[in-house]
Image (cartoon, rainbow, N blue to C red):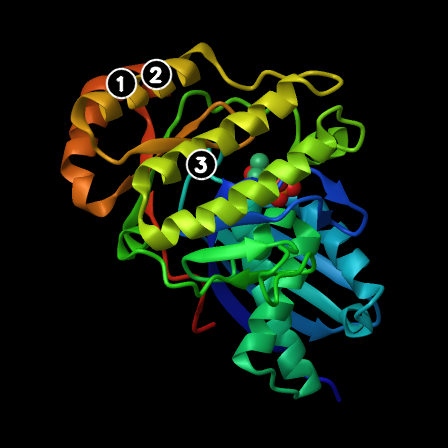
Amino acid sequence: MKKSYEASWECPSNIALVKYWGKKPGQLPMNPSLSFSLKKAQTKTSVRIEPASRRKVEFLFEGKTSFFTERVEKYLAAMSLEHDWLNNYAFYIESENTFPHSTGIASSASAYGALALCLVDLKQQVTEKKFTTQQFFQKASRWARLGSGSACRSVFSSFALWGRLEGFPNSTDCNAIPVTEKFHPAYQSLRDAVLLVDSSKKQVSSSAGHEMMNEHDFKDVRIAQANSHLRQLLEVMKTGDHQRFFQLIEKEALSLHALMMTSDPSFILLQPNSLAVIAKIRAFRQQTGLAVGFTIDAGPNIHLIYFEQDKQMVHQFIEGELLSLTENGDWLDDCIGNGPRKLNG
Ligand code: PMV
């Protein structure tokens, strides 16, 4: 007689420094990307499974049914084609975020990361097969990728690389890998202040955005650019050339938006205040000589990237000069984190 099982995991979101934009069939990336995991922005998910004659899903987000229920059902249906054991259980899933929705933090990355970790954990229990730590997280990264591409980078602490990068052993399109290069220690103290310029729903979903890369005039150039940026960034992070580091990550963020602006149809997701925040950050860097810069995801909100040692001055700058440009003075302060954590379910 089959038993019931339970798994609970907490998984962070991540912020990309080199952006994943455009995909090949099977949710494989057109170009490699690099991100760091956040610390405070986490999704906590518990999955209980009970034997059933066919797969059934009940999903509660923060105690309520949500739009995500349908996505989780579709995800499990797709996964069950390859993993038959998923068809023999009823899934009772409860999930919550430690950060508010639509705040410029990719909630799908932490959500699919946490769900995939629970599923791999359950697979171990159901099959009574113990994976090595490396196998466990590699599998979780693959399963997370199938939910949302960028989620595959969330199951590791600090820096994760997703996508095949020539000359970088073990890099693959199928899952992210932890980056164990010996970086300058400053990069272990990176912080991400998310300045909320506009929390309204995005005009274009990331799936539609990825799709537009298939026919994009700059597709080949973008793939070459991302590979080159990634290679340069990995070198710069070893030497600790902060000036070049910020040049590269800003160029990445602005290239992502340039690609959206020049796609067919075209989208402009930056708002006037996004540009005003960028101008202020650049002026502040020039005046103070501090190592600060920004990145941006596929939306109007600006992620101010800085180092722990400059926290006090950067917070003063945010409060004095940037909050008037944000929606209701809203911002979130996060930093590089330690990756996912198994919870006692
Ligand atoms: O994982 P998706 O399909 O939501 O795509 C995310 C794409 C960006 O956030 C814009 C970039 C990235 O690498 O995270």
Spatial separation of the CA atoms under disc 2 and disc 1: 6 Å
Q: Residue at x 64, y 44 (%)?
A: 68
The image's mark for residue 279 is 2
Kindly check if marks 2 and 1 are in contact, taking CB atoms under 8 A apart as contact: yes
Question: Mark 2 or mark 3: which comes first in sequence?
Answer: 3
Q: Is residue 181 left or right of residue 287?
A: right
Spatial separation of the CA atoms under disc 3 and disc 1: 17 Å
Q: In terms of image quadrants, where is residue 99?
A: top left
Q: What type is the residue that disc 3 sits on? A: Ile
Residue 69 seen from this side: yes
The image's mark for residue 83 is none
Q: Is residue 245 left or right of residue 200?
A: left
Q: What type is the residue that disc 2 sits on? A: Ala
Q: Residue at x 66, y 60 (%)?
A: 172
Q: Quadrant of ligand 1?
A: top right
The image's mark for residue 249 is 3
